[in-house]
Image (cartoon, grey):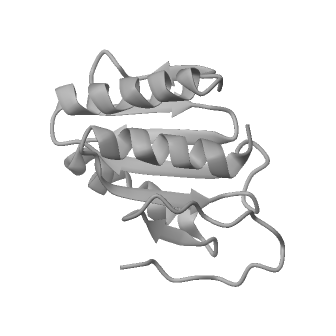
Amino acid sequence: MDISTLEKIVVDALEDIKGHDITVLNTHRLTALFERLIVASGDSSRQVKSLAHNVQEKVREAGGQVLASEGEDNGEWVLVDLGEIVVHVMQPAVRAYYSLEELWGGETPTRLRRSAAPLPPADDSEAAQTPAA
């Protein structure tokens, strides 16, 4: 499955369960471990767990592989490792405290997801972009 398809599946799964403040970070220049980092918020531990579970379910239904997930016992912050994409679903206070967007943002494009359109494929000619409104 290509990265754009996987990204769309993840974002759609998050939007299905009313995840908010969905941010996609293109990390291909920062690490060889994964291509995208997706961060989303849920308002309660129950919603955070549901969002992470829905991502895993939709990826598997589409034929993708979930490598691991962490944090489901607590529900404040759940990480879902999909290989090329790492998904962090967090409660707002935890998200504000750890500020992953600042840690991983650097010069890479950041987009707040408001539609199902995926980020364009990464290449070295990308110009830095500002967050979409």
Whether residue 66 is situated above or below residue 119 in the rendered picture: above
Quadrant location of the C terminus? bottom left
In the image shown, does 20 or 13 lie closer to the viewer?
13
The percent position of residue 96, horizontal first and vertical second, equals 28, 56
Query: Could one spot residue 52 in this view of the protein?
Result: yes
Query: Could one spot residue 35 in this view of the protein?
Result: no
Q: Residue at x 56, y 21 (%)?
A: 60
For residue 84, side relative to residue 105 (left or right): right
The percent position of residue 74, horizontal first and vertical second, equals 27, 21
Q: Residue furthest top?
A: 73
Q: Residue furthest right?
A: 124
Name the quadrant containing residue 132. bottom left
For residue 86, side relative to residue 27 (left or right): left
Q: Residue at x 60, y 22 (%)?
A: 66
For residue 52, side relative to residue 32 (left or right): left
Q: Residue at x 28, y 26 (%)?
A: 50
In the image shown, does 79 or 50 lie closer to the viewer?
50
For residue 106, side relative to residue 41 (left or right): right
- For the image, the number of numbered tags is 0
Q: Residue furthest left?
A: 44
Quadrant location of the N terminus? top right
Name the quadrant containing residue 123. bottom right
Q: Residue at x 74, y 63 (%)?
A: 121
In the image shown, does 95 or 87 lie closer to the viewer?
87
The percent position of residue 93, horizontal first and vertical second, equals 21, 49
Whether residue 82 is situated above or below residue 69 in the rendered picture: below
